[in-house]
Amino acid sequence: MPEAHAETAHQHHAPTKFIWKYIFSLDHKVIGKQYYFLALFSVVVGMILSWLMRIHLVWPNAKLYGLDLLSPAGAPGGVMTPEYYLSLMTLHGTIMIFFVLTTAPQSGFGNYFLPIQIGAEDMAFPRLNMLSFWTTFVALMVLLSTFFVTDGPPISGWTGYPPLSAVGSSAGPGEGLGQTLWVISIAIFCIGSLLGALNFIATTLDLRTKGMKLMRLPLTCWAWFVTAVLGLLSFAVLFGACALLLLDRVGGTSFFIPGGLIVSDKIMPHSGGSPLLYQHLFWFFGHPEVYIAILPGMGVTSHIISCFARKPIFGYRAMAYSLMAIGFLSFTVWGHHMFLSGMSPYSAFSFSLFTMAIGVPSAIKTFNWLGTLWGGKIRFTSAMLFSIGFVSLFVTGGLSGIFLAQPQLDPMLHATYFVVAHFHMVMGVAAIFGMFAGTYFWFPKMFGRMMNETWGKVHFWTTFIGVYCVFMPMHFIGVEGAIRRYSTWTDNYLIPMIPVHEFMTIAALFTGAVQFIFLINVFWSMFKGEKATDNPWKGTSLEWTVPSPPPFDNFAGKHPVVYHGPYEYGVPGKDKDYVMQDSPEKIEDDE
Amino acid sequence: MGLAFFVVLVLITAVSVYIFGAHIWWPPHAISTIGPSVDHQFNLTLILTGIIFVCAQLGLGYFAWKYRDRKDGRKVIYSHGNNKLEAGWTIAAAVVFIGLNLIGFQIWAKMYFTPAPPDALQIQVQGQQFAYYFRYPGPDGKFGPTHVEKVDDATGNFFGLDRDHDQDSKDDIVTATLGVPVNRPVELILRSKDVGHSFFVRELRIHQDLVPGIEIPIHFTATETGRFEIVCTQLCGLGHYKMRAFLQVMTEEDYQKWLQSQMAAQ
């Protein structure tokens, strides 16, 4: 970067007007918070949808007062129709995956902490950053608007497979305007994510402060960087898939619709398209997306476990390289979603081998987390509890992947609750545990006040036991053949499983309810929490060298200089049990 | 707090292992020639992942307990890692995961790479919102051509046959139940009329999507008679949950009788 440019960058001052300070802000910290609160709002909506689904599954005739006001057709008299269940399921998946799992860990925490952790005063392109947030915001509004169109939200699931999603309203309720808005929303979301990914990559590569070598980056930064690369390469493909699907819906094209289809007794005016093409494009995005959701959680977990075990992370390089290996391999495994789709059965061989291979770096990470705990002095803060919980959930969810990676076992398990259990454990709950851990850990820095630790621990134990009660039984009935995406059970063999569903519904209502402890803790602590010091957890990375909350340009115009790796805890022969990254003191085996 | 972690993880592990081990919920008894090998691979995977699950969860719980901060001035083990260990567990994980898959892959090959034997009974399976229909070629052994414009659910012409003009269609038999003889290879040719569907019979360990625009063959040999549910597992619209049919596996004799009665009903 030319000197002159760097100088001018120093001179921008904090805006004073409300609109430029809080709404259309260019400050990465404000944008990070905007993303975080967008995700927090979305996760509440998504969770309420899951409650409604779970209630419908076991009490299909339950009257839910008020639901008929939201959707007179979907819930006449407050009783949900089977198709409205599918609408809620579609939006639950879409909201959770795009607007929660993709948004909070990467765009929320990443935006806030990447520049601070690498010693930069902002992201590389602040204006682009603002644009990505507001693009994402528009995408969410478009998606939520499907609740209010006549037909209701689409019923084709978050995967939106054509022809169901492509042939229009003759395929079912919600497949008219609702489905069109869904496609548009996802396309807009892709644009926001692409802009964000560019920004993260440029920031990580170009804005590291003096001494912040790549191998001194906190593992959170590695995770955000690899995630950004995945986002850049995969959202571009999803955007293409959405554009073609939209054209099939409104432009009379036939990219994904073959000839000779008869839907609701009407011959469809399409010919020559391939439904499998969409599935390939979708999962080419969809599988890296799983890692987009979980990698930042791995980064946060590594960061926190090292801090509260008061030990250097075990195998820093292995941790960084395994992130890269997972990132690379994630582009080679998408076909494991399609073993039974009708694609060439020969390709299953390579897809399953690569999928098994991706288990290897995942196992490396787990071993290294255990290695970090080994011989440590563990402090059980709420952040640490959620990080250890993350490891437990990641192991459980990862191991069911060993079954699903094998095409020969797919005839038993494909499209059953075993799959639902698998991805909820590993990319849903584990990733959300990463977010909880991040929240308890960084809240003092973001808001200048501490969260209540007692309630944090209550939140952890109830949630940890709760999620095992919700998702573990799904494995059991999945093995027996319980099929997902059914709004009710009429098949003879599914009926005896209803008591298990009742148990899971009660567990889900309970686990959902205890999340309000967290919400209240967040909002109460924001205003009433104990004032936070600059470094309440005795951390070593650069975010703990600046005031809580940090000033507008993070380092007050100075450039910190980095001398050490990010996890120098428990260093022998030192007064304190940690050495900050910007501390010039010598450490024996410094890299 | 460390002890609590240990206890909770022990409980979660014990309950999970017990439920899987006691087969409280378990796949039904397999009734196809391929079934036992699928079950064998499943059990092998379950044992292997079970061992990893128990070791990892208990190890995590034990470490959380043993290495809690007791405020006793103990020094931590200051270690940045160990390359030999890293290499060790990388190789171990790679051998176990990839080896497991290679062992089982011959089952997949039997399902999909090996074609159905030439004497296999061919049956077309059509999925549509929200039912299955099955077509047998009749005594001539040939399926007549289908015509999109002739499809009419109201008159029961689900496949769009032109029985007046197409010689091969005249004796085709269309049914709502999939009747097959026991111990005889059967080849299903799967197709869809409208959107994506799937064909899943738990007892056969056979599961395949029905994709509009293409015909997908699968084959199996049933080894036991009985009536089994065929269910749809690919989200196909508002009636997805009730899309099902039955597979009736019969003795050769019963099968011939059944086919005659179906032919008479056309």
Image (cartoon, rainbow, N blue to C red):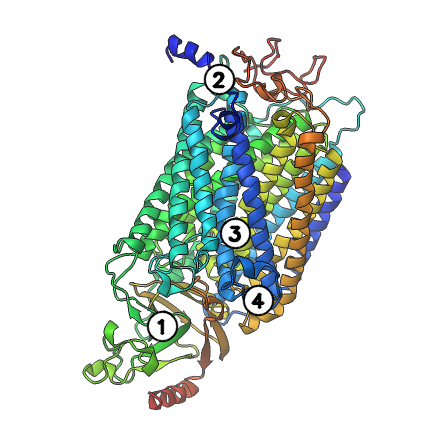
Question: Judging from the image, what secondary structure is the residue with disc 3 in?
Answer: helix
The residue singled out by tag 2 in the image is A213
Tell me, yes or no, whether dots 2 and 4 are on the same chain: yes
Name the N-terminal-most of marks 2 and 4.
4
**Which residue is depicted at the point 57% across and 66% down?**
A77
What crowding class fits label 1: few (fewer than 14 Cα within 10 Å), some (14-19), or many (20 or more)? many
Please tell me whether mark 1 or mark 3 is closer to you in this view.
Answer: 3
Report the amino acid beneath label 3: His
Label 4, label 1: how many angstroms apart (C-alpha)?
Answer: 39 Å
Report how far apart the C-alphas of labels 2 and 4 lie in the structure.
62 Å
Does residue A141 appear left or right of residue A482 in this picture?
left
Q: Do labels 2 and 1 share a chain?
A: no
Closest to the camera, between mark 3 and mark 2, is: 3
- The residue that disc 1 covers is B125
User: How would you rate the neighbour count of disc 3 (Cα within 10 Å): few for under 14, some for 14-19, many for 20 or more?
Assistant: many
Q: Residues within 10 Å of mark 2 (few under 14, many from 20)?
A: some
**Residue drawn at point x = 62 percent, y = 28 percent:** A442
Chain to which mark 1 belongs: B
Q: Name the residue under label 4.
A: A77
